[in-house]
Amino acid sequence: MHDVIVIGAGFAGCAAAREVRRAGREPLILEARDRIGGRTWTDDWDGQRFERGGNYFHWFQPHLWTEVVAAGVTPLMPPYGDRVHWTVGEEIRTGSRAEREALNESAWDKYCAGSWEILPQPHAPLADANRIGRLDGMTIQERIDELDLTDDERALLMVECQGVASGHLDDAGALSVVRWHALSGHSLALTQETAGGYTIAEGTIAFLQPILDAAACELRLEAPVEAVEQEGDRVVVTLRSGEALPARACVVTAPLNALGSIRFEPGLSEGKRAGIALGQAGLGSKVMLRVRTTGGPVAGMHPDHPFGFISTIFDLPGDEQILVCFGNDGAAIRHGDLAWAQRELDRVVPGCEVIGMNCHDWLGDEWSRGTWGIHRPGWYAHHHAEMQRPEGRVILANSDFADGWAGFVDGALESGKRGGAWAAAAA
Ligand SMILES: Cc1cc2nc3c(=O)[nH]c(=O)nc-3n(C[C@H](O)[C@H](O)[C@H](O)COP(=O)(O)OP(=O)(O)OC[C@H]3O[C@@H](n4cnc5c(N)ncnc54)[C@H](O)[C@@H]3O)c2cc1C
């Protein structure tokens, strides 16, 4: 019998397994995919290392930065230029970054007004439920609609919020924006920095692998879990292959939107089932476009667009660049259709010839069913605490359930550490 079975080899799963090992127990990791990393994925595109999933990090993220320093990897700032566009209606405006950011900040500050009072302890969202109650009950769209904004402010605020939400504004919870803002020191500039400030030169995998190595445990890839059953003082984890593995405790790190495919016996609490049925609203996309253009790095913002938030991530030799485009609707992406990509890019950033496109379908991926964790209205009032509560010998742990940087790698580490420590004690 295993001490602790950890389901999932993303950051939460690897951190949980390391915690189990540190407590002197033996973990086993079961991962559905043929790779570790989950919603992070360092890959190669014609010799260029790039990240299909999470890759922007910041020293405001305490769990993550500890790992970055320990792994000795190199934080890199992406290239920034002053060629900035934003679209209002169908009209592309061109200006300086400072000009755009002044408009952007004015709108953002109206949205986030009172954030110090709403979330004085952003790492403890439930510290005072009364403070967060109003925004927790609203969608982002409802919050925007109650603000007095110019057309430019409204367009820019919508793109910023769609960037935060990776989803539809009438679906995502209004508190998510203020939570991110509060975690980033209550400032738009710092929110943008935590969202896109730094990548890791060696790739995200370079600080995930040491965490897995420290867990010093068996990892089984291509081992999708079908069921988690509790029988007396043990848990039996059954793979889709039919193999049954007993353990003393289990940490389930499947993302919220993928949890529904695992059968729990006895069933999870009514509160957890309601949380899983609600799911999370991050259903957007991250598309990489290889383009030919002159004049340095580009940036563009267009609300309700499949490439809503665009910026250069690699300035390559020979007038080539790789752009990253964050859209709010993963279902709108026409994978591999360069003519479509060209038409859409022209609506946001003029003067770029599209020569390649690369994108993972996180929405269609059965092990994620979405991008990053953005909670729907009512999450904190009804689901957050319950999702963290262990049941018998089973605990859920994932970035989607973190107290602090939920939806980020930092949140995965926070939640994984908590889950692993609990399971080691329960085993
Ligand atoms: C496009 C994109 C961009 C992002 N950008 C950033 C960013 O810039 N910065 C940042 O900090 N975060 C970013 N994120 C979010 C970040 O990547 C995630 O929050 C974090 O990686 C989640 O880690 P996790 O371990 O909690 O969950 P996951 O990474 O989802 O890991 C869960 C693991 O469980 C496995 N699994 C699921 N079901 C089963 C099953 N039935 N059996 C066995 N295994 C199963 C999955 O395959 C997966 O490996 C981004 C995410 C995406 C998708």
Image (cartoon, rainbow, N blue to C red):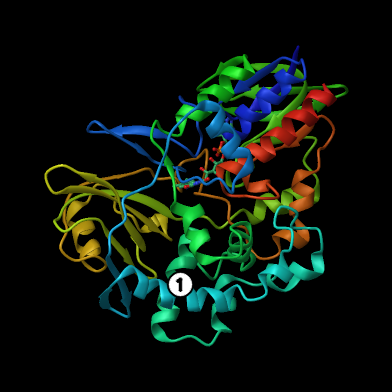
Which quarter of the rendered picture does the C terminus lie within? top right
Nearest the eye: 13 or 68: 68
- Asked which secondary structure carries label 1, the reply is helix
Q: What residue appears at the point 48 percent right and 58 percent down from the top-left corner?
A: 166
Q: Is residue 372 above or below residue 394?
A: below
332 vs 297, left or right, is right
The amino acid type found where label 1 is placed reads Met
Q: Is residue 200 above or below residue 179?
A: above
Q: Residue furthest right?
A: 232
The reply to whether the residue tagged 1 has its Cβ within 8 angstroms of ligand 1 is no
Residue 351 image position (x, y, % from top left): 15, 63
Quadrant for residue 69, please give it: top right
Answer yes or no: is residue 167 visible.
no
Q: What residue appears at the point 39 percent right and 30 percent down from the top-left corner?
A: 202
Which quarter of the rendered picture does the N terminus lie within? top right
Q: Residues within 10 Å of mark 1 (few under 14, many from 20)?
A: many
Quadrant for residue 88, please give it: bottom left
Quadrant for residue 76, please give it: top left
Total numbered badges shown on the rendered structure: 1
Nearest the eye: 95 or 285: 95
Q: Residue furthest left?
A: 318
Residue 281 image position (x, y, % from top left): 56, 58
Q: What residue appears at the point 19 percent right and 59 percent down from the top-left corner?
A: 342
233 vs 41, left or right, is right
Read off the residue under disc 1: 158
257 vs 119, left or right, is left
Residue 149 image position (x, y, % from top left): 48, 85
Q: What residue appears at the point 68 percent right and 33 percent down from the top-left corner?
A: 252
Answer yes or no: is residue 424 visible.
yes
Residue 284 image position (x, y, % from top left): 44, 55
